[in-house]
Amino acid sequence: MKPNPILLFCYRLGMLLYPRAFRKTYGEQLLLTLKDAYVERRSSIGFWLGAYLDLSGSILRQRWEDAKNHSVRYAAATAVVSSFAILVMAILWQQTLRRGADQPQGMIVDTMASQMARGAPLRISNASAEMNSTVRPFLIFYGNDGKPKWSTVFLNRKIPTPPTGIFDNLSRDGSEKFTWQPQPGIRVAAVARSVKGGFLVAGRSLQFTEVREAQARVIVVSLWLVLMATLIGFAASGLRRNLLAV
Amino acid sequence: MEANDLLPLSPVVFAILTALAEGEKHGYAIMKEANLQEGGGITMGAGTLYGSLDRMLKTKLVEETGSTDNERRRYYRITEFGQRVFEAEVNRLKLTLASVSRKNLVQGA
């Protein structure tokens, strides 16, 4: 009785994961032995389960043996792939933190815009703060000419004004998210929206986000350094073993 | 390399050497022999078998006979060095068993 062709095909596919030299030397013998064993199997499910488990374990073992014999090649390949993966992870992490910094401002602007559209009176806190000393969200309203009308935040006792290009974008697109640096050392995550009679800008200091970004950078760089040190150690031990074998 | 350098042998290697100590065999015959109670009762798949044979060929415990049957099955045999390692392992196990017996650690042993 012949083995199930699909399961046999999958087994052959799995064999492609063996190191090439091993596959070339033993591939045919492996299949012959598998077919011999199939003839005397007790149950098909048990046979294939055992065969695939054995194949998986054997592939890992042969890969590990191969990695020890070609440690520099494996270490270099792992370094390239893992560095790329860590870089992608770092970018995604940074993006997630930066997007999170926009969260309350977006909600504030949407709420205020809908109140203004309904003509409802705006409930704005009278308390105002200097931009360089607050981490609380703030709100500024600019007229259609780009001149500030009112604000819950000040910078050097004046209402700060974003780059003029922002208002052009708002007139065209309706809303905008941007990082605003009104003066060196102050960076703000801002969300702006075009409303009736002008533009609303809600912002919040990026101070905490930048601290978290710095912490994330330390973690990612440490992870990368530990990984690289491990790979260099692995490659060096392989080289030493090969030299001693000669 | 001395025979004792390779001791103790793993159960799979010992079972393969036990099977080949009787005479040359192909892969499946080794697997069947190893699976018998007197062969060690070791259940191994084809991947484990050829992975072990590969390492045993590199350490010169076994060698290919160079002959194949009509199905192209390759045959393997134990080398002189492999035989010495096998005997050294058997003697090591005998000493362990003798010690177990002498100390009466297992009833009926």
Image (cartoon, grey):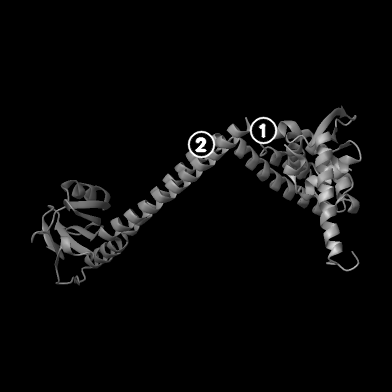
Question: Does the residue at mark 2 contact the one at mark 1 (Cβ under 8 Å)?
Answer: no
Chain that bears disc 2: A
Given this view, does label 2 or label 1 mark the residue nearer the observer? 2
Q: Name the image quarter holding the N terminus of chain B.
A: top right
Of the numbered discs 2 and 1, the one sitting upstream in the chain is 1
Q: Is residue B77 above or below residue A44?
A: above
Label 1: how many Cα within 10 Å (few below 14, some 14–19, many 20+) = few
Q: Position of residue B61 (x, y in %)?
A: 79, 37
Element marked by disc 2: helix
Q: Amino acid at mark 2?
A: Ala
Q: Residue at x 80, y 36 (%)?
A: B81
Label 2: how many Cα within 10 Å (few below 14, some 14–19, many 20+) = some
In this image, A10 relative to A99: left or right?
right
Q: As drawn, which residue projects farthest toward the top?
A: B66
Q: Is residue A151 above or below residue B34?
A: below
In this image, A25 relative to A217: left or right?
right
Chain that bears disc 1: A
- The residue that disc 1 covers is A20
Q: Name the image quarter holding the C terminus of chain B.
A: bottom right
Q: Residue at x 79, y 50 (%)?
A: B11
Mark yes or no: residue B33 visible. yes
Element marked by disc 1: helix
Question: Residue A29's image quarter?
Answer: top right
Q: Position of residue A222 (x, y in %)?
A: 41, 50
Front residue of B95 and A241: B95
Q: Amino acid at mark 1?
A: Arg
- The residue that disc 2 covers is A76
Q: Position of residue A75 (x, y in %)?
A: 53, 39
Front residue of B25 and A218: B25
Question: Residue A111's image quarter?
Answer: bottom left
